[in-house]
Image (cartoon, rainbow, N blue to C red):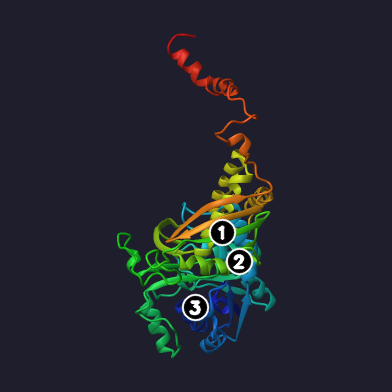
Amino acid sequence: MSQTTPNAINKVVLAYSGGLDTSAIIPWLLENYNCEVIAFVADVGQGDEELVGIEKKAIQSGATACYVVDLKDKFVNELIAPAMQAGCIYEEQYLLGTALARPVIAEAQVKLALEVGADAVCHGCTGKGNDQVRFESTFAALAPQLTVIAPWREWEMRSRQELLNYLAERNIKTSASATKIYSRDANLWHISHEGGELENPWEQPTDGVWTLSNSPQQAPDKQEIVELEFAEGVLTHVNGLAHSQTEALVKLNSIGAEHGVGRIDIVENRLVGMKSRGCYETPGGIIWYQGLRGIEELVHDRACQRLRHDLGQRLSDVLYDGQWFTPVREALLAAVHSLATKLTGTVRIALYKGNVTVIGRRSPLSLYSEAFATFEEDEVYQQKDAAGFIRLFSLASRIRALKQGGLA
């Protein structure tokens, strides 16, 4: 990114959430860069609690304008859906709720910056986290001429209390307080929780951590069956009713949250090198994920399943590392989409006290044949044929043993 002096910045577009960090960033930019600040808010399904009144709040903090952009459908259709087709899951647990949203948000921020003639973009990511890489990698790929301002890497403030004091001194209101100890990120896909007792990996999360879902203990004592229908990897129906993928996700979130599914507690490896402990709630996401795996079991042979798994792992790293706008992502996604053309069918999933279990699947493209798989009498499989297969399959082991025993 280009380097410049503060006086060279005339107009900056800030990725604004209305939270503690970005509330402090607006006056800080005005004081340190003497520039016009435009607030950009990405609606990725974080909910009315965060969005109601946010334009007024940004203006009162010193922004000249605030743009709220609805990105929910783009988020679901262009990021979540292909990630689920690929089976993206980071370090075997995390469904990438924060990472999936960042390319959509940063791309829209760049678009707005170019439209309003800004010469800089700004984010509120800390110097310890992954998000700074995700945002700035997108900026570099889409608009390298824009200067990037990262206040957490410039200002002297280092704690929540210092930020609260900074805002209080300027009479700028914030909903944050010293008693709100958790750092959270919410969108249509998930909500994440960090901080508080979670900073000690030995401590169990208290009930105050979880905000989206019931605990398994609170969940209903009776299982619920959910039926999902997919067409070439696209989620089209929930319980027999047609929905857009965004509508389907909203419905699955509600159902899954009731049954306490989608909670994880993970110590993950951040891109910047440190480990962090976080709790995530992705109730609809885990149902969607397991549904596609159920269809996949029917329609993909072993080689295709293993290829999809490898692609999913590679794409997970690409997403986690903020490398969405790269040729390698394009290549990986082309392969994912090719395999997804076979993901057509219906799956039944049982939800019960935190568990998500596929209990039935069917597909017009199924490779499963009861005639071959049956334990009863059949007329299509000659069991004696297995002897020749096993002899050839084990030939290398046979030759090695003969050589070692001096018999060949």
**What residue would you read off at disc 3?**
22
At a point 56% along the width and 76% down the height, the residue shown is: 14
At a point 42% along the width and 61% down the height, the residue shown is: 353
Q: Position of residue 342 (x, y in %)?
A: 67, 48
Give whichever of discs 2 and 1 has the lower sequence position: 2
**What residue would you read off at disc 1?**
288
Point out the residue furthest to the left here.
Answer: 202
Above or below residue 89? Residue 195 is below
Q: Position of residue 136 (x, y in %)?
A: 56, 65
- Crowding around mark 1 (Cα neighbors within 10 Å: few <14, some 14 to 19, many 20+) is many
Give the numbered dot on residue 248.
2
Residue 321 in sight in this render: no
At a point 33% along the width and 68% down the height, the residue shown is: 206
Give SS at disc 3. helix
Point out the residue furthest to the top here.
Answer: 407
**What's the CA distance linking mark 3 and mark 1?**
33 Å
| Amino acid at pointer 3 | Thr
Give whichever of discs 3 and 2 has the lower sequence position: 3
Above or below residue 408? Residue 194 is below
Give the numbered dot on residue 211.
none
**What's the CA distance linking mark 2 and mark 1?**
9 Å
| Amino acid at pointer 1 | Trp
Q: Are marks 2 and 1 in contact (CB under 8 Å)?
A: yes
Q: Position of residue 218 (x, y in %)?
A: 39, 68
- Classify the position of the N terminus by image quarter: bottom right
